[in-house]
Amino acid sequence: MNTKKVAIVGASGYSGEELVRLLLHHPHVELVAVTSRQYAGQTLAQVFPKFASHPQSQVLRFSEPNAALLATQADVVFLALPHGVAAEFAVPLLDKGCVVIDLSADFRLESAEVYKEFYGHDHPAPDLLGKAAYGLPEIHREDIKQSMLIASPGCYPTSILLPTIPLLKAGLVKTTGIIADSLSGVSGAGRKADPDYLFCECNESVRPYGVPKHRHLSEIEEQLSLAAGTEVIIQFTPHLIPVNRGILTTLYLGPAKHFSNAAEMDELGHAIAASYAAAYGDEPFVRLLEGKSLPDTKNVVGTNVIEIAWRLDPRTGRLIVMSAEDNLVKGASGQAVQSLNLVCGFPETAGLV
Amino acid sequence: MNTKKVAIVGASGYSGEELVRLLLHHPHVELVAVTSRQYAGQTLAQVFPKFASHPQSQVLRFSEPNAALLATQADVVFLALPHGVAAEFAVPLLDKGCVVIDLSADFRLESAEVYKEFYGHDHPAPDLLGKAAYGLPEIHREDIKQSMLIASPGCYPTSILLPTIPLLKAGLVKTTGIIADSLSGVSGAGRKADPDYLFCECNESVRPYGVPKHRHLSEIEEQLSLAAGTEVIIQFTPHLIPVNRGILTTLYLGPAKHFSNAAEMDELGHAIAASYAAAYGDEPFVRLLEGKSLPDTKNVVGTNVIEIAWRLDPRTGRLIVMSAEDNLVKGASGQAVQSLNLVCGFPETAGLV
Amino acid sequence: MNTKKVAIVGASGYSGEELVRLLLHHPHVELVAVTSRQYAGQTLAQVFPKFASHPQSQVLRFSEPNAALLATQADVVFLALPHGVAAEFAVPLLDKGCVVIDLSADFRLESAEVYKEFYGHDHPAPDLLGKAAYGLPEIHREDIKQSMLIASPGCYPTSILLPTIPLLKAGLVKTTGIIADSLSGVSGAGRKADPDYLFCECNESVRPYGVPKHRHLSEIEEQLSLAAGTEVIIQFTPHLIPVNRGILTTLYLGPAKHFSNAAEMDELGHAIAASYAAAYGDEPFVRLLEGKSLPDTKNVVGTNVIEIAWRLDPRTGRLIVMSAEDNLVKGASGQAVQSLNLVCGFPETAGLV
Amino acid sequence: MNTKKVAIVGASGYSGEELVRLLLHHPHVELVAVTSRQYAGQTLAQVFPKFASHPQSQVLRFSEPNAALLATQADVVFLALPHGVAAEFAVPLLDKGCVVIDLSADFRLESAEVYKEFYGHDHPAPDLLGKAAYGLPEIHREDIKQSMLIASPGCYPTSILLPTIPLLKAGLVKTTGIIADSLSGVSGAGRKADPDYLFCECNESVRPYGVPKHRHLSEIEEQLSLAAGTEVIIQFTPHLIPVNRGILTTLYLGPAKHFSNAAEMDELGHAIAASYAAAYGDEPFVRLLEGKSLPDTKNVVGTNVIEIAWRLDPRTGRLIVMSAEDNLVKGASGQAVQSLNLVCGFPETAGLV
């Protein structure tokens, strides 16, 4: 299998660092460039001592981000940049024929208006909107394989979309009244020097934020609408909890067909189980929990796996679905590498197990 | 003001320990007995070094629980015992004229059948059901003042009932479709040697549990039904998060009257604000947040305060209400002391600020 | 007892916030001013929601720091400012007759040269050096009572000096070869937006820092030398650990008189116990642990208490002394209030239990 | 390369679980048996959901520990059993020709008397003492390669021995007066249901324990004495800190040759650097830090690497050496796999990077 040359732009944040970890050990990848204005000139080993055991970390130095140069060095470029900045950086790379896998929100939406509504500024490259594949491999695998531009999903969207889409597609749940209550570790806020994320402000603290209109709603609703074939508006409440990594999402869904006794509940249960089995039974990175097991972030941290469990409540008639993922792996960098594998024709699990 | 003699049965668990802390410093209370089978014979200072600076901790020794003896020593007895055990212990104390403030679930319900459904065994003293005051002072203050038996509420119920009851009473929200999503610190599981609550099993872990039918639903729904004047069934999902103390509850409520534009939303908002102000504007232990503030457990830990904030979502038409409390104080021992103050005629905030 | 009017300059950092907490509840103090450039104009309740239950927090607003104005408002001014800034601010306050209790390092040393060596800049008010009382009440109580300027000790120094000084004064340990190995919670680094103190950089991390010459050595050695009557140079290694609050110090000391059998070890043990009992037996804020107990920061967090325990090691002939304190209370703000009580003639424990 | 069949006895504790993780992914190993009385009959995936993505976890079931049976199944058996139990289990395995890699303390010492002194009971298989290789590959590589019985070192000993032995062998530090101050994550206490290790008892707590005579001293001193060629007695103080994994050790050493000026200090520094470079310059799992870097457990957690840094203190004349490791990897299971690789002739880093 041919090795691909890969670069990471914005490699000093948490997602970028996680990309470095995964790509250094990827069997079919050569990591040829990492950029960071702050650390330009230093080796990977100097900035991230934990990678120092890898030989490449001793020689690869952070460089200033330079799209023209990167385009000559790399076949595939990961962008781990802030929203707004990523789009501008992507254009020259795409022009030169690089595959771009963007971890920002810049290419996740189809509509420039929705982008502006949720991100507060005009889209920097509206011509490219709608041209990217949404990089959720379990849902858009074929698109990803054929795309030069992949918009890797957000961490919250991944934790909500994967459990919900099969049920919507199968018509098992209502498209209205969906609630997603999510709990995220602090790395989701990025490595930025904001007092709100100091250790003493987060430790022994639990708090909601961004209520009721978080930015990620835009891509969540666009993808859910696509799956449902009708416009879907959901309720989404994120909370910050004192762990480094992990997102736990609890979803409240209304069954499309009301059940009023144990037999009907069983029937619905079988349909739900069958729907998940059909969607994810062969997926290497989706773990459908059985028996009494419920998701726990500690079972997925450091892996590209999302755990999913569900319960029907005979008292309320509602369906509760719960998921757990590592926000930096399946919710960001691991999923981006999964897309890399697809677009490059590597085994989908390469570098991820 | 006359001092009352007070005892704590089961003083070695987390709620018991918190009662010790509060009662040692209470201006109108003499702590005359603390019981614990495990620590009988040892002083408070030996078992809990953090209380060693208080002179009483040097002389007060844990004793074996003995209802007959306690009845001769104390005017008021707090029971911090497991469910099922508390009821049996209460009977002889009540017979001897003691006031009993019970932190277990044994007297929180009116119905022996509901008790059996949720707790899995027959109620040990069914004659007493319906005779206790439910010890939520902001809702049942007059009942508490006149009762010899006070059933102090559970931690989750407190975090759900206080934000919801005023809205139900005012008819502002629907009685159906209520969802409570709660996050609790690990002390809620008690000081028991269960591997599930070891440091390494909880740290860097977030997980739901007890889905979909947690025991606390019984008292939550009984109290909500009482407030609404109709039977209320809710959805409740507890989660375990790695903090010592604190419960953060996010409630999803449907406005009784649909709003379809900004003016109607404002009108509803004013009604909600007015309802909360009327219910809690003068309450010393309810903090109604204003402006952009949202609840954060770190602002209430160690205090008897519950924080409440709410948001109307114009996109979904839903009302989101969030609360934060210390599960061991407002959710357990602090609230029990608040009831003590009421029943003894002390200032309601005595020993709690 | 006359109430004193008190101000806090730099009230938005962790030490300042802890001073606010203590002084709002102090029975003989009126908190008349709190300053913060960042929060000027906002009330205490707005900046620190956890204090919102105190009536004073609703009306007291942060102001810009203005020494001339503060001198007209307050009898006593606490300075919770960075090193270097505090000294300049103190001068006009002292000139106007205010008592100044400074939590910075600016007045802790006698020598301007030592100050420059350890803090890297000239002392801004060298005339005042040597005129301040070193605010360690258990050691310098009489000085503090009579001083207009009190240099409240650092958190590490407190954890080292209190366990060591009685042994040095009694001649029980050698003045050479002393090692202090200390572990501090993250609040010791202050509320500053430095990526090193982000949650994800501190959680699941343990690390030494400032090896081998930490700034606090200057005041530690000056005070130890004073106690020993000879120059004392020690080894000091601080470590950062993922807790909000608390310092645990382990001291390695050489007995002045070698012991070579159990009887001699017992004799030395009795002398050590007697020395500590004489020094601290009546001290309200020093807890001498007995039996098998060892210090644990969780037993002192939130209190002004320091726990001390010691062990003689027959295998090495060494004395191990361990202490635990809350770095923000006994290690900073609580101790400063203890000095306030002394200088104002209040009971020494006022506002601290 | 021939694959070896490997079993783990006691696979449900933290060390056992970590062995499972490493061996499932080891390229030259087939994991054929895992034992646990508690979980016998259940699959690996059922007990440890985080391994469920590995196909072997779906079919491999925990069995009751049965040495005779295991001897027919496995070429190499890892024992992750409590002290005392391991030795009895090892005898029949060795008799049948299995290689035994023991993670307990049972074979780490040469002397049955020392074992009894530190472990409180007679050694169960004294004939085997002195026949095991001490499984510290960087020090005893050749012994390990030729041994059928490998005593894998303790976590604290590893963190102390690796930084100290090269200096002792080179005669650069005194053999007397050595102090090791260590901080360990809670997984070091094992997965046992002891209230002392509950989340709420460890979180926001820091405490020393086992002062002054911890069991691990026996193997530390035996190995140091071996390296020094003379009896070495050290001071060792372990502390418990609220992280899942990691040990940070700070060592206080006296240079063999006193230095009294900068030139002499530089000379000694060169000798120390040269000694470490000679000992570990080519070691894949020892990272010698340079420049201003100091060890941080977060840089080694999850890896088999130990970080080492050192500083000479011109003020005290002392040498400070600091190390960081993952107590469950380099301090236990990773190091045991390193020994497996040596004894089986695999590349030493197989399965460990």
Image (cartoon, coloured by chain):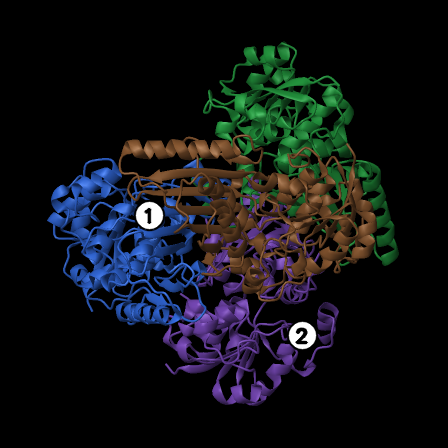
Chain colours: A blue, B brown, C green, D purple
Q: Is residue C207 left or right of residue A194?
A: right
The residue carrying pointer 2 sits among few (fewer than 14), some (14 to 19) or many (20 or more) residues within 10 Å by Cα, namely some
Question: Which is in the foreground here, disc 1 or disc 2?
Answer: 1
Q: Which mark is residue C250?
A: none
**Residue that carries the numbered disc 1 in the rendered image:** A235
Q: Quadrant of the C terminus of chain A?
A: bottom left
Q: Which one is nearer the viewer's eye here, A53 or B143? A: B143
Tell which subunit mark 2 falls on. D
Which residue lies at the image location 40% right of the left edge and 82% below the top edge?
Answer: D3
Query: Is residue B188 at all visible to an observer of this figure?
Result: yes
Q: Quadrant of the N terminus of chain A?
A: bottom left
The image position of residue B56, as x and y in percent, is 79, 42
Q: From what the image shows, is residue D107 above or below residue C331?
A: below
SS for callout 1: strand
Quarter-of-image position of residue A137 = bottom left
Q: From what the image shows, is residue C113 above or below residue D256?
A: above
Quarter-of-image position of residue A330 = bottom left
The residue carrying pointer 1 sits among few (fewer than 14), some (14 to 19) or many (20 or more) residues within 10 Å by Cα, namely many
Query: Is residue D293 at all visible to an observer of this figure?
Result: no
Q: Which one is nearer the viewer's eye here, B131 or D235? A: B131
SS for callout 2: loop
**Residue that carries the numbered disc 2 in the rendered image:** D110
Tell which subunit mark 1 falls on. A
The image position of residue D296, as x and y in percent, is 50, 51
Residue type for callout 2: Glu
The image position of residue B318, as x and y in percent, is 34, 43
